[in-house]
Image (cartoon, rainbow, N blue to C red):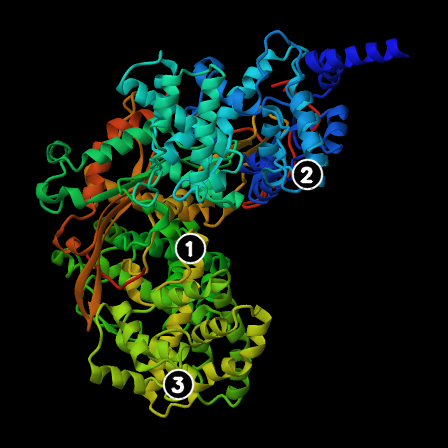
Amino acid sequence: MLVAAVAGGLLAWDEMRTSRLQAREIARYAAGLDYALVAGPSDAIRFPSHGPFDQRLGYTELPRFAERLQARGFALTEQVRFNAALIEHVDRGLFPPYAEKARAGLDVFDCRAQPLYAFRYPYRGYARFEDVPAIVAQSLLFIENRDLLDETRPTLNPAVDWVRFTRAALGQLGRMVNADLDAPGGSTLATQIEKYRHSPDGITLDAREKLRQMVSASVRAYREGEQTLPVRRRLVLDYLNTVPLSAAPGHGEVNGLGDGLWVWFGADFDRVNALLAAPEGEGDARIAQGQALRQVVALMIAHRRPSWYLAGGRAELTRTTDAYLRLLAEAGLISPALRDAALGEPLAYRNLATDPAWLPASPGKGTTAVRTRLAGLLGTSLYSLDRLDAELGTTLHGGLQQAVSDYLGQLSDPAFARSQGLIGDRMLNPATLGAVRYSFTLVERTEGGNRVRVQTDTTDQPLDINEGSKLELGSTAKLRVLATYLELVAELHDRLAALDPPALRQVEVDGQDRLTRWAIDHLATAPDRSLSAMLEAALERRFSANPGEGFFTGGGRHTFGNFNAGDNDREPTLREALQASINLPFVRLMRELVRHAMYQVPGSTARLLEDNDDPRRIEYLARFADREGQLFLRRFWRKYQHSTPEEIRSTLLDGLRPTSDRLAAVFRYLEPAAPPEALAAFLARRLGESPSATRLAQLYTRNAPEAFDLPDRGYVARVHPLELWLVAFRLQHPEATLSDAVAASADERQQVYRWLFRTRAKGAQDSRIFTLLEVEAFLEIHRRWARLGYPFGHLVPSLATALGSSGDRPAALAELMGIIVNDGLRLPTQRIDTVRFARDTPYETAFAIRPVAGDPVMAPEVARALRGALSDVVEGGTARRLAGAFRLADGSELALGGKTGTGDNRIVVKGRAGLALNRTATFVFYLGPRHFGTLTAYVIGPEAASYRFTSGLPVQILKSMGPLLIPHLEPASADACLPPPSSPAPAALGVGEEGGVPEGEVLSSRLREGKITGVVVE
């Protein structure tokens, strides 16, 4: 028995020292844990549910990310599958063994798989174990795990230090007797790494969690075989690169020695390493080495309680650091002289208030746009997105994006601008180039979607002008008006073309509906009754350009002017008016569209009021009020559905022409108990100036809650009364549903329409009826514009919308041009092709955008007619300087077309243009059969009043950019983008479903690896 006991003891001692038996058995077990990447979704995968590193890298969020991406048009194309042994291992609560990433982050690639952006966190770190200065590694091991790198024990299990473990166990027993006893810890570097990476909240809650850390670390150590020295060296490297060191304001969480030195002490990582890797110096050199060593040792100690030591416990950290510096000298790891140098240098912390540890990043506007889009798709922040272990494949062409950005950036140089033909009348002034900003978007039509190849602007702000702005882009609105007009012509053709001339003459047409009357006359007399011929005839209709007429619109009488006074006596065709960008024909065309909407909407008020003697008038009105009222209420509900109370208020107010009467009428309705001072402050914010005391009192009293009923208040404010009511209802009841709003508005719906018949003065009655009818007509026109990609929730109900007063966005204009280029098919505008998470890990999951069949939103004949009209703008109109400018290598000329627009956006006070807000000049274009986009020049701020450039500026810039663009417009460019990613069959627009490559097909193995009314210039 004694011999057996002695033998057993010797074997146990040998095992504790060498880990030979553990090495053999655990290595055998670890070899059976495997996973592989397969096509399609995996039915055998487990994602972590906790752990700081798993959370930061996004592994815990992958099920949610997958759900969101698949619901937004992405297909899951590849995912890891665990084998049965790994499933069982993880189901026991253990962490899967694999080569974890010490540094990771978001990678963004362009359409050629070339890098656009790379974020790595932690920011600083050692690339190899050999890069770690010996004294740094020795200090760490002395403090935390002294025998870890013992080369005489090649199979050592790094997860268990039996001496420390036993000492710690005895210490815990002692604490059961004496709670004040200081018990040493038993953790090794391996178990500490498992703890702060994977344990809940990065802490050890109980003995069970400690056991999980030890077992998981042991399996991870032997996954490459029985020899563990390389693994142990990697543990030192990983610990130094990833150890948590609290968090700092303006920086976020701090991990790793490199980031810790920079954040907490402002120390340069490379300099610290150079000092500690060099032989011990003399004088100032030794002092610098001592300071560097002191900072390193302090952070190694701070890991034990980083939030305490690096904030309120700095004095305690100093004392503990001093003690360890003395112990290092006693152990012979550093010289007494270096010890004294270190002790003589106090820990000088960075002042985070005056010197924040902030690292500016310049990812570029295109990259920022796709990162922002992905963050929205995943439901996360840009801060968290950058720290995910993820790869993003974009549609951008990195080379062209950079070339265009560089070109636009040079336009602030007078010599360069002059060389590009940009200096001159109605162009640029050399003295004021710096304030002009530019934005450019280029999109390519591809199979399954429109892919953005370039998206950039020259602002130094996060805002993306292409997608995040609301600008008055002037006469580009004429393109939207013309598209609506031709769509209505196509609808009339569809309704009337089957009728013969006698039947056409029997069709009842209201006298105000000139559009339907023209359609009937054309079809009754035209030899060619085809839709294409009718659309061409519609473009040849003539409208007066005379500015002498006053137009009753937006609740008042308005006049409009042309950009060129020489056009005033013309009566051009619509094609000619588009070519020369003449305003008045489009104002009159918009009036025709509004009248058509008034008299063509089924059950419209205009139809109802034609017969004043109809005995069923009240009955009709009640039915109409309830039906129409619910219809408009539902439209307004959708408009505000996902908005916060502040956004609801802003949307309503931004849609008003800002006058003191209108704003006061709305304010007193929304806030009936507010004092006069609140009204004064509100008007000052919206108008830029406060009314006089007398005027304020007048506005406050005149618009009191009891002064108007709802319809009269809506008339005064020039807003649909039901929209005004719904905004007040939503502000008072933010949790209410649509059903609640419908139920609560029964009386208001009747009241809104009955009031029309209570006014005795016929003229006042007619003007009020017309104002409301115009609002309703613009709701119908907005519905049509929104179907073609108009980005905002409302139009200003005024004929000035034909000239750009409702605002637009360059990206939205590009989308409209895409519909025209695509023969009426609305394809999604894509900036992201692929997303891959956790490459080379057990959680790897990949997605690809699902090709979309598209949504036919415009008749192909209408799209072709618009392309022809836009081509005329280049051939002989406001963009004629582009004619012949884009020729391919074989000498062929690219078909070009586009629409120009210039906007001068100013605050209007008492009918007169005042303070300038911005000036814009835009060209929306197509280049050949596949490419289209926008180019905008703009100045923001009061200085915009001194600029006189027009849309000739972006046209000339596009012409000058020809040499940059033409190589990429070639049918077979040498620098072309890769084909779109293969994924399951096309889906309907906006729908993403799973499918694709057979699920079980193995691809590769991972075995152990504000709107303000403006004056339109053009």
- Of badges 3 and 1, nearer the viewer stands 3
Circles 1 and 2: CB distance less than 8 Å? Answer: no
Instruction: Please give the residue where the numbered disc 2 appears in the rendered image.
Output: 175
Query: Quadrant where the N terminus lies?
Result: top right
Residue 847 sits above or below residue 692 on the image = above
Quadrant in which residue 38 is drawn: top right
Q: Which mark is residue 487?
A: 1
Residue extending furthest toward the right: 1
Residue extending furthest toward the bottom: 760
x 60%, y 71%: residue: 739
Q: CA gap, disc 3 to disc 1?
A: 43 Å
For label 2, count other residues whose C-alpha is less than 10 Å away and answer few (under 14), some (14-19) or many (20+): some
Q: Looking at the picture, tell me which residue is in the foreground, 499 or 629.
A: 629
Instruction: Please give the residue where the numbered disc 3 appears in the rendered image.
Output: 705
- The answer to whether any part of residue 413 appears in the image is yes
Residue 914 sits above or below residue 329 on the image = below
Q: Secondary structure at mark 1?
A: helix
The mark nearer the N terminus, 3 or 1, is 1
Query: Quadrant where the C terminus lies?
Result: bottom left
Residue 857 sits above or below residue 9 on the image = below
x 44%, y 42%: residue: 382
The mark nearer the N terminus, 3 or 2, is 2
Q: Position of residue 632 (x, y in %)?
A: 49, 70
x 28%, y 68%: residue: 686
Residue extending furthest toward the top: 152
Quadrant in which residue 205 is drawn: top right
- Of badges 1 and 2, nearer the viewer stands 2
Circles 3 and 1: CB distance less than 8 Å? Answer: no
Q: Amino acid at mark 2?
A: Arg
